[in-house]
Amino acid sequence: MICAGTGCVANGSLKVKDAFDKELVARNLQNEIKVVLTGCNGFCAKGPVIVVYPEDIFYQQVRPEDVSHLVEEHFIKGRPVQKFLYTPPAKKDAIPVMNEIPFFKHQVLRALRNRSLIDAEKIEEYIARDGYMAAVKALTEMTPEQIVAEMKRSGLRGRGGAGFLTGLKWELCLKVKGDIKYILCNGDEGDPGAFMDRSVMEADPHSVLEGMIIAAKAIDAHYGYIYVRAEYPLAVHRLQLAIDQAKERGLLGKDILGTGFDLDIEIYQGAGAFVCGEETALMASIEGLRGMPRPKPPFPVYKGLFQRPSVLNNVETFANVPPIILHGADWHASLGTEKSKGTKVFALSGALNNIGLVEVPMGIPLKTIIYDIGGGIKGNRKFKAVQMGGPSGGCIPESLIDTPVDYENITKTGAIMGSGGMVVMDETTCMPAMAKFFLEFTEDESCGKCVPCRIGNKTLLTILERITNGEGREGDIDLLLQLSQQVKDASLCGLGQTSPNPILTTIKYFRDEYEAHIHEKRCPARVCTPLVKFKVNEEKCKKCGLCYKNCPVGAITWEKGKVASIDLEKCTKCKTCIKNCRFWAID
Amino acid sequence: MSCASPCTTPKQVAIPADDGITPEMYRKIDVIVAAHKDKPGSLIPVLQKSQEVCGYLPHSVQRHIAKGMKISPSVVFGVATFYSFFTLVPRGKHVIRVCLGTACYVKRSEEIIDKLKGELGIKVGEITQDGKYSLEAVRCLGACGLAPVVVVGQDTYGDVAATKVMEIVKKYE
C-alpha cells in the first residue's frame, strides 16, 4: 500500500510505485505481491509512506532507487529493512509494526476507517469494506424519521466547526414542506492548517457520497452538490470518479437500487474565497454570485440554495454517517464525552516531530495529542501554544495543556474546535506577530459586506502592525480588546464574529509579550525585525561560535573562548544567527 | 484623533493595449457559454473555463461573456474580482505560488516570499518583465505536513528553505 495523498505525491510516491511495478515484474512476483495506491495515510511528514500487509510493516521516506533493495530484503528474504522503519525521536530502536508506533497507537479510526486500506479510485474496494451497506439499510429498511432519530441519538455534531447537532438539522429540514430540497456537502476547507477534509475526499470519496445518500433520504432531497475548493484538484478528480462509479452501479441517479428513490450529486468547484466556507456564502457561490453571506434567519433548512430548504454538512460529518447507521447510535456514542460524542480528525502541523492527520476520541487530553501522538516539539525547543480553529480560533497556552479536547472545553479556553487544524508553536513564535498574521488573513478574506468586519478588522490589523513595528502606543492593548469585542458582536457572519479570537486569546495568555513590544520595544521571540537589536548578550553568550559559522554575510566576529559580536554595518538582519543560537544570546 | 487606518492609493493595474485574445479564443468561449447559459448559477464555471482558454480574464473577455449570458458586465466583473482564482492580468509562463497558511507561516514562509521578491524584482501578484514568472501568495494548500510549501506550475515542493528557493525556480525556463 503506497500512500498517494497530496503530501506523499509531492515527495515522489508515484515514482516509487512505478519502481515497484518494474521491480516486481523483473523478479516475476507481480502475481504474488499487489501494489496499491491509497489515500492519505496521515503521517505526511514522513512521506512517501508504504505499509505492507498482512504484517502491517510501516516504511517511511522510501525513494525509487531504494525499491530494489526493499523488495530483495523484505519480500524475498523476509526481513524488514531497518533503514526505512520509523524510529521515535531520541530513541534507538525502530518500531516496524504500524499500530505500535505512538503516532498510530492512540488513534481510533472511524471517519478515516478505510485509511491505508483501500484504493480510493475503486468502488469495489470500498464495497468490500462494508461500503454502501448503510445506504442500503437506510434506503430499504428505514423511514426518514428513523434515520433522523438514530442520528439524534448518536449525538453526532457538525465537524465543520460550529458543532451543531447533525440529527437536529436534518429533522428541521425534514419537517419543512417543499417539493425541491438540496443536500449539500461543504468541502471548502479554507482554514489554513486544516487538511482533514482534503484527505477524506482523496482517500475515501465514497464514504462522503454514502453519507450524502443517507442524508438525502432523511430530508427527502433528490439533488445534491459537493462544494470543493479549486485548490484541491486531486479531491475533485477522485470525487468525480466516485460519482461516476456509483452511478454505474445504480447507487446514484434514478431509482436507486430499485427503491424508487432518486438522487443526483454534482461537484461544484469553488474559486478561492475563504468566506465561502460560511453556509449562506457557499450557497450564494453555487448560485453563481459573489460569495457573500446573508443574515440568518431565515436559516438554510428553511430557505437555502435557490431559496429552497437545504442541509449543508461538512465532509467529515458525512464520512461519520454510514457507520452510525450501520452499527447504531450507541456504538457512536460509546466514545467521547457527555456532549461531544465519537471521534474527531485533527491536522497536526507546525513545530512538532510527527506531523500529519490523526483521528482520536473526543475528550482526549491535548497533552496526549501533542506529546504522545505528535512526538513532542521538534529540535528540543519549548512548547509555547497550540493554535486551534484557524483564523476563527485561538491559542491555548502550556498552562492549559491538560484540557480535554471536546467542543465545550476548547470553547472555554477562548479557542474553538473549528474544523480541526492544530498548529503547534514553540518559543520562536511571536504571539502579537501571530495575531497580526491571522488578521492579515481575515482582513484580506472579509467579503466587505458589513462594516464591522470590513473596517473593524482593518483597524485591528493597523494597530497590530504598529505594535510589531515598534510603534505601539500606550493603551493599544485596551483599544484592541474593546474593538475586538465590537467586531465580534456586530458582524454579520461567522467570519467577523470570530476573527478577533486570535487577538483576544493571545492577549489573555501572552499579555506580557504585547507589553514587551509596546513598553520595552522588545520582541521576546526575536521575530519582529524592527524590534531586534542584533546585539550579542554577553551574559548569555556561551562563546560557541555557532552564529559566526552560520552568518552568510560574515558580519560576526568571534574567536575561541570569546564572546561574539555583530557588525551592524554588514548585518542584513536575516536572523540566521538567532535561529542557530541555542541560548537566546542575541537580543 | 487621527484616522487609525489611512487609506492607501489602490494599485493601478496596467492593461496591455493588445490583450492577446484571438478570434479562436472567442469562439471557444462562445462554445462554453452556449453549453452553460441555461443552467442557473453557471457564471463561475464559465469564468473558470474561459480562464483556462485565455490564461486570464481581461475586460474584453468579461464583456463578451456578459453579452453571451445576457447578464450585466458589472455582475461578471463583480464575480471575477471577488474570487482569488480569477486573474485580470496575465500570468507568467511559470506561476510560483508560496503558501502563507498557518503551518507554513510558523515555518517562516514569509522569508521565502521576501527572497523571491528580491531575486525576481517583482511584488506578489506581478509578473517578471520577460513574462517568465509570476509570483503569488496563496492560502493553505492543505499540504501542511510538508511546510513550508512552494508550488511552481503543477509541481509541489515541500520543506523549502528561503536560501534554496531560487535553485528550484531556476529549473523552470
Image: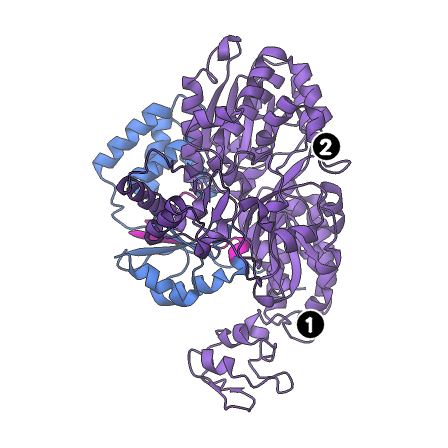
Chain colours: A purple, B blue
Q: Is residue A204 visible?
A: yes
Classed neighbour count for the residue bearing mark 1: other residues with Cα under 10 Å, few (<14), some (14–19), many (≥20): some
Q: Chain of mark 1?
A: A
Q: Position of residue B107 (x, y in %)?
A: 52, 61
Q: Which label belongs to residue A334?
A: 2
Which residue is label 1 attached to?
A516
Are dots 2 and 1 on a single chain?
Answer: yes
x 40%, y 43%: residue: B86
Query: As displayed, is residue A10 above or below residue A551?
Result: above
Q: Quadrant of the rendered structure where residue A437 is?
A: bottom right
Report the side of A421 relative to A81 (left or right): right
Q: Position of residue A531 (x, y in %)?
A: 59, 74
Magenta segment, which residues? B85-104
Q: Position of residue A533 (x, y in %)?
A: 58, 80
Amino acid at the residue labelled 1: Ala
Q: Position of residue A539 (x, y in %)?
A: 65, 86
- Callout 2: helix, strand or loop? loop
x 71%, y 63%: residue: A510
B91 is within the stretch colored magenta = yes
